[in-house]
Amino acid sequence: MSGPLVVKIGGSTLGAEDTSFEDLVALQQRGLRPIVVHGGGAMITDWLDRLGVESEFVDGLRSTNEEALRVVIAVLRGVVNIELVAGIIAHGGTAAGFCGVDGAVVRAERYDPRLGFVGRVTQVDPALLDATVEAGVIPVIAPIGIEAPDQPLNINADTVAGEVARAVSAERLIFLTDVDGLMDEDGRVLSAVDRPGIEALRVGGALSGGMIPKVEACLRAAEAGAVAQIANGRLPGTLRRIIDGEQAGTRVGG
């Protein structure tokens, strides 16, 4: 049997035309084994503002103090994760919500004092995810890891998706975003790009901001044998079209 399909869903992709839930359920019914990783940055910002909790960004990452961490955990695990699980169930699928703390699936460590309780992944234990997938259930993972012995950490969701794909020997890693793919200096969507091409885009300034961790995660997954893709999740049927071999977005690596 082929490896799982890891799908990273961003909150900005879930709109009126989005069919990600239908696609995930349909693909599972066709014998694929989806695993979902999600973010939730916009909702976190909204709730931090509502609660008057200060936060700032350092090199594109949200600096997270102890008070902000509680909000991050509450939003990611308590709101976004549950909404995604419920959405899959509503479309006829079976799903279960996790975060990286559950079963110590995602182990992490703090690495920059300026970022506070933000972690980088040190290990992904695939055992719980493998068992869930084999039971016919779609795991939906919130990007919160655990630093030994018991400290939860906020982690970039794109990075988590890449490391999960590596750990479960995924056949594919697909990032559903709100853009058509990776673009060159002239704004044209690239159908494919390898590591030297990515470095050229970075030097030329076409690769920046939130696309950087997505691309790095794709390269990590591709190194382990996955086909990694960045595509527009707001368009109907994106997931199914990619699996069926249609050109959509940008293939990264290889």
Image (cartoon, grey):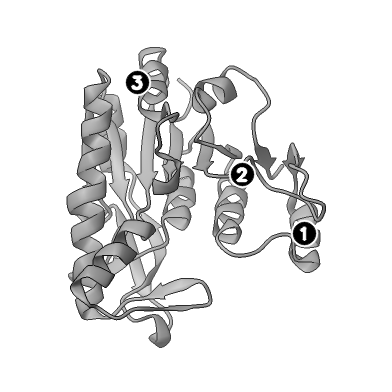
The residue tagged 2 is: 222
Task: Using a 10 Å C-alpha cutoff, classify the residue at mark 3 as few (fewer than 14 neighbours), some (14 to 19) or many (20 or more).
Answer: many
Task: Using a 10 Å C-alpha cutoff, classify the residue at mark 2 as few (fewer than 14 neighbours), some (14 to 19) or many (20 or more).
Answer: many
Q: Foreground: 212 or 236?
A: 236
- Label 2 or label 3, whichever lies nearer to me, is 3
Q: Is residue 162 left or right of residue 145?
A: right
Q: Which image quadrant: the N terminus?
A: top left
Task: Say which element carries label 2.
Answer: helix
Q: Residue 201 — which label? A: 1
Identified at 20% across, 50% down, the residue is 79
- Tell me the distance, in whole angstroms, between the alpha carbons under discs 2 and 1: 18 Å
Q: Which image quadrant: the C terminus?
A: top right
Q: Is residue 142 above or below residue 63?
A: above
The residue tagged 3 is: 25
Q: Can residue 148 be seen in this view?
A: no
Q: Position of residue 100 (x, y in %)?
A: 28, 54
Q: Position of residue 203 (x, y in %)?
A: 78, 68
Q: In this view, does 13 lie above or below 136?
A: below
Kind of residue at badge 3: Val
Label whose residue precedes the other's in the sequence (2 or 1): 1
Identified at 21% across, 33% down, the residue is 86
